[in-house]
Image (cartoon, rainbow, N blue to C red):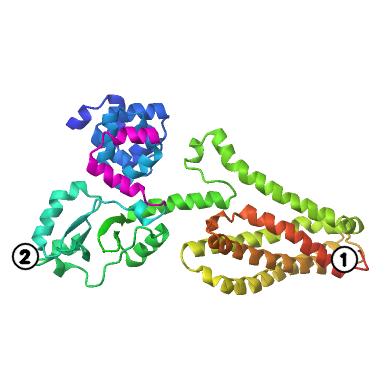
Amino acid sequence: MTPILQAVAPELLPFASQNIADAVESLNARSLDAATDIVAGLPLARVIDMFDRPELQRAGNLIARMPDARAAALLEGMADDRAADVLLELDEADRTRLSGRMRSGTLEALRQLMRYPPHTAGSLMTTEFVSVPADWTVAQTLAHIRDVERSRETVYAIYLLDPATHALVRTVSLRRLVAGEPDAPALSQAQRTEPVWVSASTDQEEVARLIRRHDLLAIPVLDEARHVLGVVTVDDVLDALIAEGTEDAHKFGGMQAIAQPYINTGFWAMIKKRAGWLCALFLGEMLTASAMQHFDDELAKAVVLTLFIPLIMSSGGNSGSQATSLLIRSLALGEVRLRDWWKVALRELPTGMLLGAMLGAIAIIRISIWQYGGIYDYGPHWVLLALTVAAALIGIVSFGSLTGSMLPFALQRLGFDPASASAPFVATLVDVTGLVIYFSIAAMILGGTLL
């Protein structure tokens, strides 16, 4: 047993000997009190490794319960970007208390990172990167990497700076340096093309797109003078995108995003997250009842029309939800831009009409089979009824597709997250208008017969 493990209480050995990912998962499964006791009994270096993982839940709560000296040492030992995230989880009083215990250099770096808006390159970047003057040799650069590698989040990309202005000149990979001659200039091993970079305000999804497109392990964040403010590593942007994808999935389901895993979210917290949207959607669905009341005379004359209301409403809502989900994702990936809204409209309108026609044909076949098979008698005007349902499906599915595709554009244009166009919201919107379309078409086709 290593000296580090010998110094750990027997009940804490699993947390000290497991790989970090498993130890973090085990810690997440414990209560807050139990987790506090565990991190208090582990060596600081081990706790730093665990807190450096974004998968660790309740990091802010755990740090707030630690003695000030240990909490400050923990924050200083963590990667700057992760420490900034944890500090943001603390309330103002705890943040101020711990800030007084930290070194001024570390504190200033963390405060700088905390100033950047969420979901931007600045909020994701770390200031712990390797940079050297562009006139250094390969041997000098490798020696510097050996000296600083323990304090850097990544050493696989080295940034060569102008010796006078400190502006970024080129990027060189560790692999190229290892393969180079010791006396050769590091610049001779660097990529020949202009480095790919982003500004601090670049959206994290654009950062991810560039990393994927250029097959990078990290991308530098530059200011207007091309000074390197930090780097965004591929693992950090991946963690951020997973978290954002989870948030968008919650929104698209018609609820506020939850920060904790489902099983760890309190009962009243879950009610709070779900009740607001649910009440808003319920109020919206009340318009459906108002629409039906408006057509109560038609319903009284042709009760058979009510048999197809669920079919009509669900088809329109489903087509709208399909279009919305497609466009939200396309906007997120940059496949379409705001200026492309008219192209999308011209594409979705005929698509919706064809899809509606397909569903209408199925509806006609179904009504015919039921009528001829004696399963249900739709009356002497069943053919007109079938045509009414088919025409209504074409109109409603077309409207649903067009509305569902345009709503994300409208939300983004107004400065909202397109993911707020949840499937229940689109379905509610199409339900109300779908009834109006259905009964308007019924009045035209069945006027003088059933109506």
Q: Is residue 218 magenta?
A: no
Q: Amino acid at mark 1?
A: Trp
Q: Quadrant of residue 319?
A: bottom right
From the viewer's perspective, is 295 left or right of 253? right
From the viewer's perspective, is 194 left or right of 203? left
Q: Quadrant of the C terminus?
A: bottom right
Write the residue at 56% across / 54% down: 420
> Can you give x and y, in whole percent of width and height, for residue 56 in the image?
37, 40
Dot 1: few (<14), some (14–19), or many (≥20) neighbours within 10 Å? some
Q: Quadrant of the N terminus?
A: top left
Dot 2: few (<14), some (14–19), or many (≥20) neighbours within 10 Å? few
Can residue 108 be seen in the rendering of this structure? yes
| Residue marked by disc 2 | 183
**In terms of secondary structure, where does tag 2 sit?**
loop
Q: Quadrant of residue 439?
A: bottom right
Write the residue at 32% across / 39% down: 51
Q: Earlier in the sequence, mark 1 or mark 2?
A: 2
> Can you give x and y, in whole percent of width and height, for residue 84 in the image?
33, 44
Give the answer, above or below, for where 340 lies relative to 274: below
| Residue marked by disc 1 | 382
Q: Foreground mark, 1 or 2?
A: 2
Can residue 384 be seen in the rendering of this structure? no
Q: Amino acid at mark 2?
A: Asp
User: How far apart are the two marked residues, 1 and 2, measured between alpha carbons?
Assistant: 90 Å
Residue bounds of the magenta highlight: 92-118
Q: Quadrant of residue 111?
A: top left
Write the residue at 91% across / 64% down: 450
**In terms of secondary structure, where does tag 1 sit?**
helix
Q: Is residue 95 magenta?
A: yes
Do the numbered discs 1 and 2 sit on residues whose CB atoms are within 8 Å? no
Chief secondary structure of the magenta span? helix
